[in-house]
Structures are given as C-alpha cells and as structure tokens.
Amino acid sequence: IAAAIASRHPARISRLVIAGRSHSLIPEHAARNAAMQAVIDENLELIDLLLTHGARTDIADTLWHSTPLGWAIFLSKPQAKARLEAWARSAPD
C-alpha cells in the first residue's frame, strides 16, 4: 500500500484495501497513511472505501501530528472534511 499511496494510485489502493491489507497503521510516504492521502487528494470514493473497511481516523501522521480530519481542515478540503465529520457522527461510541 505504501507504494500505491506514494505514487497516488487510488485504484491500486482500493484493490489492496478490498484484499484486506492494512491501511491505517502503515507509515507511508511522508509519514502519511492511506486515509490521509485520500483526504489530501480529496478522493471521496477512496475515503468512503477506507472508512467502510475500518480505516482509523484517530491516527496522526508522524511529521505534523495531524489526523485525516486535521489535514482536511488545514488544506481546505471541505468535501473531505464533511465526509469525515459525518462518519464520526455516525460511528458508535
């Protein structure tokens, strides 16, 4: 998954996620994980795929110590921000 994220191949990331590869805990290009890269690219389809396959949104990157939601806010990605906030509201406590 690291190579797919670093080279921004959403279709490849999707195939790996569906195949059951870990996608939330692996440090990736520039210390990001798949959820963070999906937010940076504002790839809503990939964000949805990652969320429905268990991506953790509470993990901060190791470079800037920000979560996917933090990246969405900082980078002014309103659709990604809204998607993550809606997901957080619907998640069980």
Image (cartoon, rainbow, N blue to C red):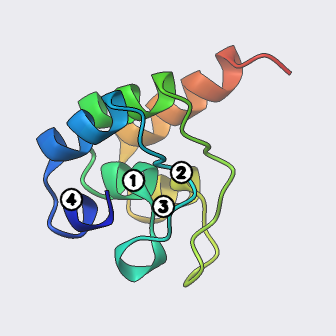
Q: Which mark lies nearer to you, 4 or 3?
A: 4
**Which of the labelled discs sits on residue 4, or is there none?**
4
Q: Which mark lies nearer to you, 1 or 4?
A: 4
Residue wearing tag 2? 24
Question: Callout 4: few (<14), some (14-19), or many (20+) C-alpha neighbours within 10 Å?
Answer: some
Amino acid type shown at disc 4: Ala
Q: Which mark lies nearer to you, 3 or 2?
A: 2
Please report whichever mark, 4 or 3, sits nearer to the chain's N-terminal start: 4
Residue wearing tag 1? 34
Please report whichever mark, 1 or 4, sits nearer to the chain's N-terminal start: 4
Vertical order, 64 against 32 (above or below): below
Amino acid type shown at disc 1: Ala
Q: Tell me which residue sits at (60%, 79%) in the image.
A: 62
C-beta proximity under 8 Å, tags 3 and 1: no
Q: Tell me which residue sits at (48%, 22%) in the image.
A: 52
C-beta proximity under 8 Å, tags 2 and 1: yes
Side of 43 where 23 appears, left or right: right
Please report whichever mark, 2 or 1, sits nearer to the chain's N-terminal start: 2
Q: Which mark lies nearer to you, 3 or 1?
A: 1
Residue 48 coordinates in the image, percent (x, y): 38, 26
Quarter holding residue 88: top right
Residue 92 coordinates in the image, percent (x, y): 79, 16
Residue wearing tag 3? 71
